[in-house]
Amino acid sequence: MTQKIAIIGLGSMGFGMAKSILAAGHHAYGFDVNSEAVGRFVALGGQTGQVSEMAPAMDCVMVVVLNATQTETVLFGDGTNAGAGTAWAQHLRPGTTIISCATVPPDFARTMAAKAADLGLNYLDAPISGGSIKAEAGRLSVLASGAEVAFKKAKPALDAVAEHVFALGSEVGAGSAMKSINQILCGVHIAAMAEAMTFGMTQGVSPAQTLEVISKCAGTSWMFENRGAHVVAGDYKPHSSVNIWLKDLGIALDIAGKAKFSAPLTAVALQQFVAASGSGYGLEDDAAVAKIYARNAGLKLPGEG
Amino acid sequence: MTQKIAIIGLGSMGFGMAKSILAAGHHAYGFDVNSEAVGRFVALGGQTGQVSEMAPAMDCVMVVVLNATQTETVLFGDGTNAGAGTAWAQHLRPGTTIISCATVPPDFARTMAAKAADLGLNYLDAPISGGSIKAEAGRLSVLASGAEVAFKKAKPALDAVAEHVFALGSEVGAGSAMKSINQILCGVHIAAMAEAMTFGMTQGVSPAQTLEVISKCAGTSWMFENRGAHVVAGDYKPHSSVNIWLKDLGIALDIAGKAKFSAPLTAVALQQFVAASGSGYGLEDDAAVAKIYARNAGLKLPGEG
């Protein structure tokens, strides 16, 4: 069933998802404060426009911005955030479904859902996992929770962007909780990859050898194989940046602290990403956390002079 | 080519490997200080005997004991370690190959190889990865380094126990270095699994839900899926025990410290295993590190009263 779907936020994830929605045959409308990204999307056959004019026509709105603040601004802001649009919620028809994809605290998701409900809107708490390449291939994992009607109305959009949609129950917040569990593991695994590869270098084992061998041993992880290849190639073009982890592990530790949950590995991994950001690598690929380990041990990574 | 192969150490790994060697049609000779394990092996068709009588007949000797001290004792000890045998090296024919499988520091492996060379023996630095189930299935990964002649003579034994044999060069020590890289990742990943699963419980997400969903997300790892299943089942029968990590992460940190390499995730993971051991879980499956996280947050894991 062809739908009118707005994608708010055309960063690396949102742009890929917008392309997948176009490819699935829907009418896709892209919005971003970055007009260059909007232009690229229109050149691919996407549409755009003024929020107040376009919003009432939408079946579904996917919010793929960076964080909780941006999510709140585009949905319930005061109208000053030109381009990406703001105050979307007040322009949507009652019964329209908001699919919220940013990584946010579960409590924040519940607050947004309550505000949406006050306007007669459906809200799906739907963080995504998989990275920009899977976004563009329509092969993301979506960790979703919300009312049955929200799932039903979101289905065409989710089918276009996702290989796996995990239905985590009717309570908004469960999706965001699962996303934080995933981010704890991803963040720790990226830092562990960096720690293990650079440790290996001190023992005369190259990152390429480590990647080849450990990928077939019990020490492997999805992130080890994915991000380890970036270290081996000396390629730090950002797919997911170092700074993402300051945000996402920060959210996880904040939730954990409120629950009186001690998360020492998460805390240490965060500090390694903080050191990477503080050293000027914040906008590089998150595999650049390896540069902290290497520098602290006087090592030169592949691709370093 | 049928060979005479001695397996020294019939613990959970060695026993499985000895069975795989029998199954491959070799003459397999088992030795252990635990006479009950030797009896079980003989009941399966294996052989045993006195070291001084049996050693000269062997083509190959696999040392599958717990650590460096035991490795040195069985190879070069003074004869007091009855049963498993001791002073093996002095009874072996020159040209016989020693396959050393325990997790040990690379420097230790080099020392053993030099002592073996003095007696005209070949030495393969060949730590193993994969656990007791893969040992019994003949599907281990072997991380091996040593002279070409050692690889050649070890091939029949390795083919019987391993799915992957990684040839890491002619320098003894490279195999042990790769094993430590693997153990850093495995140890951190097990503790990260425990941290993430119990964190999820504070957010209303059950370990079973976490295992199901994260296994299909970027947060997964080999250890997450393998050991996470133990937590979900509440099953802490030891496949690999908590105490193994006090040893193996201790070796990794010792090597790292000598190389002036800072390994904060490894250090934190080790401390969580130390806390598990100190709490009385040292001989349980290493997934029992989850009990430390759960207790510190007032949570009850699956299977706990």
Image (cartoon, coloured by chain):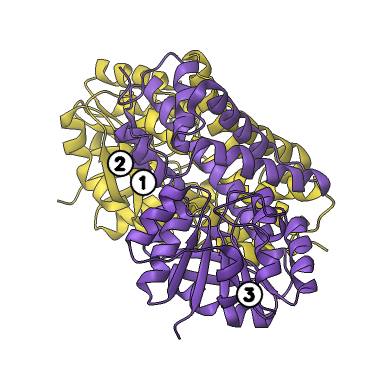
Chain colours: A purple, B yellow
Query: Callout 3: few (<14), some (14-19), or many (20+) C-alpha neighbours within 10 Å?
Result: many
Between B302 and A220, the one lying in front of the other is: A220
Above or below B146: residue B58: below
Considering the image in quadrants, where does the C terminus of chain A appear? Answer: top left
Picture coordinates of residue B132, whole percent (x, y): 46, 53
Above or below A215: residue A130: below
Q: Residue A212's mark? A: 2
Return the chain for callout 2: A
Report the residue that reaches farthest toward the bottom.
A1
Amino acid type at mark 1: Ser
Q: Marks 2 and 3: in contact by CB < 8 Å?
A: no
Considering the image in quadrants, where does the N terminus of chain A appear? Answer: bottom left
Return the chain for callout 3: A
Residue in the picture at 57% in, 29% down: A272
Residue in the picture at 55% in, 70% down: A54
Task: Check disc 2 and report its element: helix, strand or loop.
Answer: helix
Task: Check disc 1 and report its element: helix, strand or loop.
Answer: loop
Q: Do the residues marked 1 and 2 share a common chain? A: yes
Between B222 and A128, the one lying in front of the other is: A128
Q: Do the residues marked 3 and 1 share a common chain? A: yes
Between A85 and A73, the one lying in front of the other is: A85
Q: Residue A215's mark? A: 1
Amino acid type at mark 3: Thr
Q: Which residue is mark 3?
A: A97
Amino acid type at mark 2: Glu
